[in-house]
Amino acid sequence: MTRAIVAGDRLRLRIAQRVLQDEASALRVVADRLDKEFLKLVNGLATTPGRIIVTGIGKSADVARKMVATLNSTGTRSLFLDASAALHGDLGAVANDDSLLFLSHSGESVELLRLLDAVGFVGRTTFAITSRKESTLARRVDVYFAYGPVSEADPLGLAPSSSTTVMMALGDAIAFTLAHERGFTARDFAQFHPAGNLGMRLTPVSAVMRRGDDLRLAPVDGSIREVLVRAARPGRRSGAILLVDTEGRLRGLFTDSDLARLVEQGVDVATCPIREAMSADPITISGHANLAEAVSILSQHKISELPVIDDLGCPVGLIDITDVVGFSGANAQSSRHAA
């Protein structure tokens, strides 16, 4: 019995490895086939004034949905269009300045050809990705890229596998090429991915920090009582006071915890200079840093408030631990809902 299980496992591994190897081989072959026709397609999509509408049938429709998600997340406005539904009214979602990208391995899908008749009638630019340059779809669109024949990784050679992998990878290649041309940055990416760990990793501190009237600023000279009165703020406030010199540079931090400690020690807060009670030269962060870095600093140093300073050392904001917890919780909830 044990030998039969081991033999079965080995067979499963061989089948799985062969599938991956075959699909990887197909990708390498198609990568070498990228040519001026592919560039013509990318250039045409790059100059589309409106959105890129991507459509397909069956497995190609699944690829189209993924391609649209990648395009949108990297700054290229796009929309998935169900070919069947488009023929029954959804074509109204396509604007005159949009371009349409048809995905079809065979290039002979009846629904796509009927849709092509409909959109071609109003003069929109049409593109296609298919395997056969002699296919009906390739011959009838404005611009096409034919990736050529590929062997399906399915042992029976029937189920779409290598072909869908190739088409999906081409979608990534197009999306990332367009993003590069547009100068798309990690900060841009963060704007489209505000939730989850990715959002925290890329969100700049400046987008989350407290600022303006939410900050408690006071001169570094004076007694504790004078500083508390001067730094009083209505509404939401942080438990930290940012103490600055005459040039506005951060010199210290005084928190509610510091105040409680002094009261317990019997210190006269009415006369005690704030300089003697504050945390001098506190740990700080730049507004250009990402939120994950701020969380790491708060955790590593076991602090609750993190001043945000500009290039001159002047405070421009504050990260409070309660804000970070709220941000993380909202992102986690958003991620759960998305899943």
Image: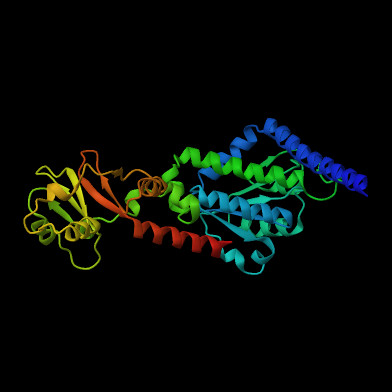
Viewer-nearest residue: 164 or 106: 164
Q: Residue furthest top?
A: 32
Viewer-nearest residue: 72 or 86: 72
Q: Position of residue 11 (x, y in %)?
A: 87, 43
Q: Position of residue 149 (x, y in %)?
A: 78, 39
* Image-quadrant location for residue 7: top right
Viewer-nearest residue: 180 or 122: 180
Residue at screen point 79% across, 40% down: 17
* Image-quadrant location for residue 228: bottom left
User: Is 25 on the left or on the right of 293, as rendered?
Assistant: right
Q: Position of residue 153 (x, y in %)?
A: 81, 43
Residue 199 versus residue 182 in the image, above or below: below
Q: Quadrant of the C terminus?
A: bottom right
User: Is 281 on the left or on the right of 84, as rendered?
Assistant: left
Viewer-nearest residue: 146 or 22: 22
User: Is 270 on the left or on the right of 57, as rendered?
Assistant: left
Residue at screen point 19% across, 46% down: 252
User: How is the rendered protein coloured?
Assistant: rainbow
Q: Position of residue 133 (x, y in %)?
A: 74, 40
- Total labels: the figure holds 0
Is residue 182 at least partly visible in the picture? Answer: yes
Is residue 150 at least partly visible in the picture? Answer: no
